[in-house]
Image (cartoon, grey):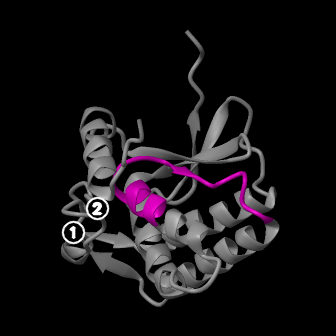
């Protein structure tokens, strides 16, 4: 038996999970090859929206099926869950993603802040939008810092967080740490 998994079906499943699990969390985990950091969900959403904007024009080019899937996953991550950078991507694919993240950061750096009304108007996926958590605006500097952290994570050059903590990027105050939970 073959099950067809349409975009609407996947979005519906993820939206249900998001409501139950992500609605209370202000952070999302960003990971690659067993490493990662936490990101403020609003900043991550804004970054990923801009990453989608710079990547979508390339999706129709030859040999970009992987990018089409990545754009879809970035849309989901912008509004529903954390970001997993694909371990299986080739060096060339990772270089393209790094370039695209850089382009998204360049666009974001052209503005000091983005009004919440603008953020909530962006169509991300179906009727899902980025929730700015009551902020009247989002400053772009912490968003760009999150993008640079993603690039460092892909390169394997993200500095280790202090012992017993995770890095947390994208907060309104900039990079900080959060305590790792004890297993139990």
Whole-percent x, y for residue 74 in the image: 47, 62
Whole-percent x, y for residue 184 in the image: 55, 9
Which image quadrant for residue 6? bottom left
Residue displayed at 38% across by 42% down: 3
Mark 2: few, some, or many residues within 10 Å (few <14, many ≥20)?
many
- The answer to whether any part of residue 129 appears in the image is yes
Under circle 2, the secondary element is loop
Query: Tags 1 and 2 in contact by the CB under 8 Å rule?
Result: yes
**Between 84 and 90, which is closer to the camera in this rendering?**
90
Whole-percent x, y for residue 33 in the image: 74, 45
Badge 1 or badge 2: first in the primary sequence = 1
- According to the picture, the residue beneath numbered tag 2 turns out to be 130
Mark 1: few, some, or many residues within 10 Å (few <14, many ≥20)?
some
Q: Tell whether position 75 is magenta.
A: yes
Report the span colored magenta: 72-90
Under circle 1, the secondary element is helix
**Between 47 and 110, which is closer to the camera in this rendering?**
47
Residue displayed at 36% across by 79% down: 113
- Quadrant the N terminus occupies: top left
- According to the picture, the residue beneath numbered tag 1 turns out to be 120
Which image quadrant for residue 135? bottom left
Residue displayed at 71% across by 70% down: 93
Reply above or below: 139 against 87. below
């Amino acid at each position: 038996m073959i099950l067809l998994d349409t975009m609407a079906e996947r979005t519906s499943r993820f939206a249900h999970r998001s409501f139950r699990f992500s609605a209370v969390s202000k952070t999302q985990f960003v990971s690659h090859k067993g490493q990662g950091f936490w990101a403020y969900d609003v900043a991550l959403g804004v970054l990923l929206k801009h990453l989608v904007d710079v990547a979508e024009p390339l999706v129709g080019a030859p040999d970009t099926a992987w990018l089409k899937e990545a754009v879809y996953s970035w849309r989901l991550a912008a509004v529903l869950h954390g970001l997993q950078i694909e371990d299986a991507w080739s060096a060339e694919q990772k270089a393209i993603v790094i370039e695209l993240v850089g382009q998204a950061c360049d666009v974001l750096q052209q503005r000091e802040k983005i009004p919440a009304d603008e953020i909530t108007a962006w169509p991300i996926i179906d009727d899902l939008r980025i929730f700015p958590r009551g902020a009247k605006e989002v400053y772009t500097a912490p968003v760009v810092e999150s993008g640079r952290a993603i690039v460092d994570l892909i390169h394997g050059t993200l500095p280790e967080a202090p012992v017993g903590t995770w890095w947390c990027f994208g907060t309104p105050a900039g990079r900080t740490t959060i305590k790792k939970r004890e297993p139990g």
